[in-house]
Amino acid sequence: MQETRILPTKNSPEIIMTPDGIIKIRGRSIHENVTDFFKPVHHWIDEYIKVPADITCVDMKLEYFNSASAKVFIQLLQKLTYVKLKNKKLIFNWYYEEGDEDILERGEYFASVLDVPFNFIRIK
């Protein structure tokens, strides 16, 4: 496995994925073709969950994302929950700006749908 980095644009998030268990998604996700954009991310995660690190830490710092992106994020995060089946630790950190109730609520929704605990971290 190799580290994968996708640089951000005005419509797409920065994504960093490392074989030692660090996954970061930051920025905005409002592109029109989420399937094509996230295809390499899905592929990387499919390979990663075969032999995950002892601790997988997912940091989500999103400013805004559309409903198509939300669906993809849930799919990606759901795949990552499989690391727990291999007796590995999984940490989800959901960052939101103070006063941004929409992003916080979306994170709470993801946590409930995935039925996994999230750490909600307020940024001032």
Image (cartoon, rainbow, N blue to C red):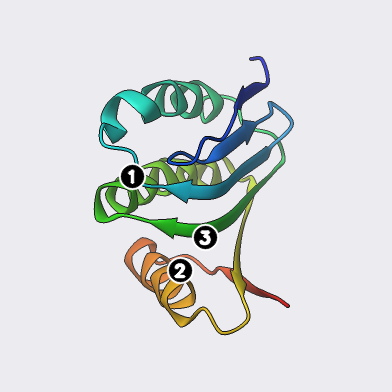
Picture quarter with the C terminus: bottom right
Look at the picture and state if 63 lies above or below 2.
Answer: below
Question: In the drawing, does residue 93 fall left or right of residue 104?
Answer: right
Picture quarter with the N terminus: top right
The spot of residue 99 in percent (x, y) is 56, 84
Please tell me which of labels 3 and 1 falls first in the chain: 3
Q: CA distance from mark 2 to mark 3?
A: 12 Å
Identify the residue position indicated by label 1 in the image.
75
Q: Nearer the viewer, mark 2 or mark 3?
A: 3
The residue at the point 69 percent across, 29 percent down is 18
Label count reads 3
SS at mark 3 in the image: strand
Q: CA distance from mark 1 to mark 2?
A: 14 Å
Question: In the drawing, does residue 84 fall left or right of residue 114?
Answer: right
SS at mark 2 in the image: helix
Identify the residue position indicated by label 3 in the image.
63
Identify the residue position indicated by label 2 in the image.
107
Look at the picture and state if 117 lies above or below 61.
Answer: below
Q: Residues within 10 Å of mark 2 (few under 14, many from 20)?
A: many
Look at the picture and state if 29 lies above or below 45.
Answer: below
Q: Three-letter amino acid code at disc 1?
A: Gln
**Front-lying residue, 21 or 108:** 108
Q: Nearer the viewer, mark 1 or mark 2?
A: 2
The spot of residue 107 in percent (x, y) is 45, 68
Question: In the drawing, does residue 17 fall left or right of residue 30?
Answer: right
Q: Residues within 10 Å of mark 3 (few under 14, many from 20)?
A: some
Q: Three-letter amino acid code at disc 2?
A: Gly
Please tell me which of labels 2 and 3 falls first in the chain: 3
**Front-lying residue, 1 or 23:** 23
Q: Three-letter amino acid code at disc 3?
A: Glu
